[in-house]
């Protein structure tokens, strides 16, 4: 598997080597309108272990954002500290996808108040 190329001066991945079918998958996800639809789609698309891994990564992102220490995150999720470290690296230096999702969720929460 090829890795994203990182520009150290920018701190974010500039581009990701193409994964066949990924753009079509992204289009399918954006066509869904509600969390229940996305849940159903993901359940059809992924195995249970794949879904668990995805859900764990998102839980890690949320806990990292709260400033929870890595060892505590690993205990709560549960996962390894290596996985927590990997997710933290992508949160800080990835393509920005985690940040976009977090910002939009925060915006939605503020609008509900």
Image (spheres, helix red, strand yellow):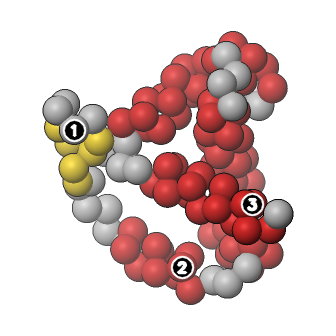
- Of the two numbered discs 1 and 3 on the same chain, state the one appearing first in sequence: 1
Q: Which residue is at a point 31% across and 62% down the rendered structure image? A: 19
Please state if 33 lies on the left or on the right of 8 as rendered: right
Label total for image? 3
| Placement of 39 over or under 34, stated as above or below | above
Residue 45, horizontal then vertical, whole percent: 63, 69
> In this view of the protein, can residue 39 be seen by the observer?
no
Nearest to N terminus: mark 3 or mark 2: 2
SS at badge 2: helix
Q: Which mark is residue 30?
A: 2
Tell me if residue 97 comes above or below residue 7 in the rendering. below
Q: Quadrant of residue 33?
A: bottom right
Can you give x and y, in whole percent of width and height, for residue 25 in the image?
47, 74
Q: In this view of the protein, can residue 54 be seen by the observer?
A: yes
Above or below 85: residue 40: below
Closer to viewer: mark 1 or mark 3 = 3
Closest to the observer, 50 or 59: 59
| Viewer-proximal residue among 13 and 80 | 13
**Residue that label 1 marks:** 10
Instruction: Rate crowding at label 1 as few (under 14), some (14 to 19) or many (20 or more) other CA atoms within 10 Å.
Output: few
Q: Is residue 23 left or right of residue 37?
A: left
| Circle on res. 86 | none
**105 or 16: which is nearer to us?**
105
The Cα–Cα distance between marks 1 and 3, rounded to whole angstroms, is: 30 Å
Q: Which residue is at a point 63% across and 83% down the rendered structure image?
A: 32
> What residue lies at 54% left-to-right and 79% top-to-bottom?
30
Q: Earlier in the sequence, mark 1 or mark 2?
A: 1
Q: Residue 71: x, y in percent?
A: 69, 13
Residue under label 3, please give it: 109
> For numbered disc 3, what is the local secondary structure?
helix
Report if the CB atoms under discs 3 and 2 are less than 8 Å apart.
Answer: no
């Amino acid at each position: 598997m090829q890795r994203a190329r990182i520009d150290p001066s920018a701190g974010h991945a500039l581009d990701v080597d193409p994964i066949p079918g990924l753009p079509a998958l992204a289009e399918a996800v954006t066509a869904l309108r509600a969390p229940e639809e996305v849940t159903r789609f993901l359940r059809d698309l992924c195995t249970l272990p794949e879904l668990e891994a995805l859900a764990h990564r998102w839980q890690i992102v949320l806990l990292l954002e709260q400033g929870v220490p890595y060892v505590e995150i690993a205990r709560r999720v549960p996962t390894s500290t290596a996985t927590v470290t990997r997710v933290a690296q992508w949160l800080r230096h990835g393509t920005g996808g985690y940040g976009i999702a977090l910002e939009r969720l925060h915006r939605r929460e503020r609008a509900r108040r």
